[in-house]
Amino acid sequence: MRDNELKPARMKRHFLPDDLIITRWEDVQPWFDDLQERDIRKTEEMERWLTDRSELAFVLEEELAWRYIRMNCHTDNKEYAALFETFVSEIEPEISRWSDKLDEKFLSHPLSSQLDREKYKVLLRTVKNRHDLFREENVPLKAELEVLEQEYGKIASQMTVILDGKELTLQQASNYLKEPERALRKKAFLKITQRRLEDAETLQKLFTTLIEKRSVVAHNAGFDNYRDYRFAELGRFDYNVSDCEEFHESIRQTVIPLVEEMHTRRRELMKTDKLRPYDLKHDPLGRPPLKPFNEVKELVEKTSEAFSRVNPLFGALLRAMNRKGYLDLDSRKNKAPGGFNYPLYESNLPFIYMNATGNLRDVETLFHEGGHAIHSWLSREIRLIEYKELPSEVAELASMSMELISMDQWDVFFPDRNDLLRAKKEQLEGIIHILPWIAAIDKFQHWLYTHPGHSHEERNNAWMKLMKDFSSSLIDWSGFEKYQGLSWQTQLHLFEVPFYYIEYGIAQLGAIAIWKNYRSDPEKTIRQYMDALSLGYSHPIPEIYKAAGIRFDFSLSYVRELIFFLKNELERL
């Protein structure tokens, strides 16, 4: 597909004026009034009401998106921060109140029960759940929480260290942990650790405040704890707490033994008696870190080429985003950490944000976020907001599958076969290492929100207990015990998006299953992948996974089957 075959066009408005500028709530209130007061007498009028409501939501979502993107790109820009805070503290609370009124209008209207049950089943259960959870007293609390949650990014974005006479972000400094010289790795690890510890108490207090306020939100809604409230708020209709516990145990039993094998092998290759925490990311044979690209421009060009080999549409999409200026990929001071793909419902083209520093992880991240972008594009024609807002178990399936599917095309970054094999091995080993971390982070959150009033010490002790179950016994943390007990603070999801993390593990299992299918029949697998992504969230999660040709299953037997496949693929390299 040539670039000019992909011509992203903005969503055409039918309900709101094209020249609408949103600076305050009163700018959009008339359209909420229209929806609330509209007389609906026919099924087709009800369907038009739903699409008009969704158009209003698309416009507001994109307005918030750009404010969020700009604030993260420039954390030192007070105007951008103020614009975001104005939206979440003044406009969003009114949107929440009026959305609940519209939910009530829809659910109580006799025509809602006459809609096509198959077509609208996900919408109906989503709207009912949202309405059931709404509490007026939670509106200002949630606005306050949304502002507080951004404090983590502000604090983390200002963490820098001096190495080799240069001021580096912690993301940039972490590249030194891949260096073959052990003394250099240790020096970098000490710098990073000491810098994180400087803000450890600040982050503890921030997190305590977040937990307390989230617990109040849960109690206001009639829940015993925030975990149970959050499960409902996230719309986890297709699995529950017991399923998460099954996931934790399946990962512990199948993956931890493999981690121990890998660390034993690493120790042997390094010819050392002890593995230290700064011995885990470098090449055990002492080879220098892989350098897949030098500049962000090269990263984009090579990723586009690899995408095009998988499917011409995928490469054309990334190039279109680049031309539009919808990529911000480099790491710099006063830029918030992390990476994301932000769907822009009006632009019909997503925005990718990340912090690239020239390592293999950056390649993995762009393929990951590119998978999200492909998902956004394939579901762009959907005109109901409830079907555009994807549950993470579905969204992350798109991204994590693309990481694995694309690996055979990584020769664009690594023309040397040995480097290519090494890159693939690092990718697969990374999956094995991340699954226990995901299980630990999720289980930690279950403990946090079912043990209200716990102290900072109790919090760290609970984390250390989990580390014994979900990390390797072969790593010697002596001298760094305090940092290990605080290592949970490196996970921004705990601060910004509570309980949004196990989805990565669920989707990672799904991605392994898709890659397993891809190994047997690439063409069919890509077709199923695209078919599943084009559904958005118009079907329950298990049905979307089925459309992708895989199972939605956390059982020990199924997880063991997938991990066995992954282990065999790793041994082939």
Image: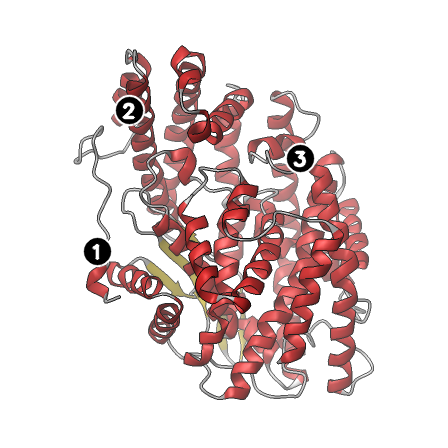
Instruction: State the separation of the CA atoms marked 2 and 1.
Output: 27 Å
- The image position of residue 339, as x and y in percent, is 47, 57
- The image position of residue 190, as x and y in percent, is 66, 71
Q: Residues within 10 Å of mark 1 (few under 14, many from 20)?
A: few
Identify which residue, 207 or 402, lies in the foreground: 402
Q: State which tag comes first along the sequence, 2 or 1.
A: 1
Image height of 47 relative to 109, above or below: below
Element marked by disc 2: helix
Label drawn at residue 290: none
Q: Which residue is mark 2?
A: 48
Element marked by disc 3: helix
- Which numbered disc, 3 or 2, marks the residue closer to the eye? 2
Left or right for 178, reference 451: left
Q: Which residue is mark 3?
A: 227
Rendered residue at 32%/62% (across/down): 313
Element marked by disc 1: loop
Label drawn at residue 7: 1
The quadrant of the rendering that contains the C terminus is bottom right
Q: State which tag comes first along the sequence, 3 or 2.
A: 2
- Which numbered disc, 3 or 1, marks the residue closer to the eye? 1
Rendered residue at 49%/29% (across/down): 126
Instruction: State the separation of the CA atoms marked 3 and 1.
Output: 43 Å
- The image position of residue 121, as x and y in percent, is 48, 28
Image height of 432 relative to 209, above or below: below
Left or right for 89, reference 256: left
Tell me the kind of residue under disc 1: Lys
Q: Would you say residue 287 is visible in this rendering?
A: yes
- The image position of residue 221, as x and y in percent, is 60, 22
Q: Would you say residue 358 is visible in this rendering?
A: no
Q: Are marks 2 and 1 in contact (CB under 8 Å)?
A: no
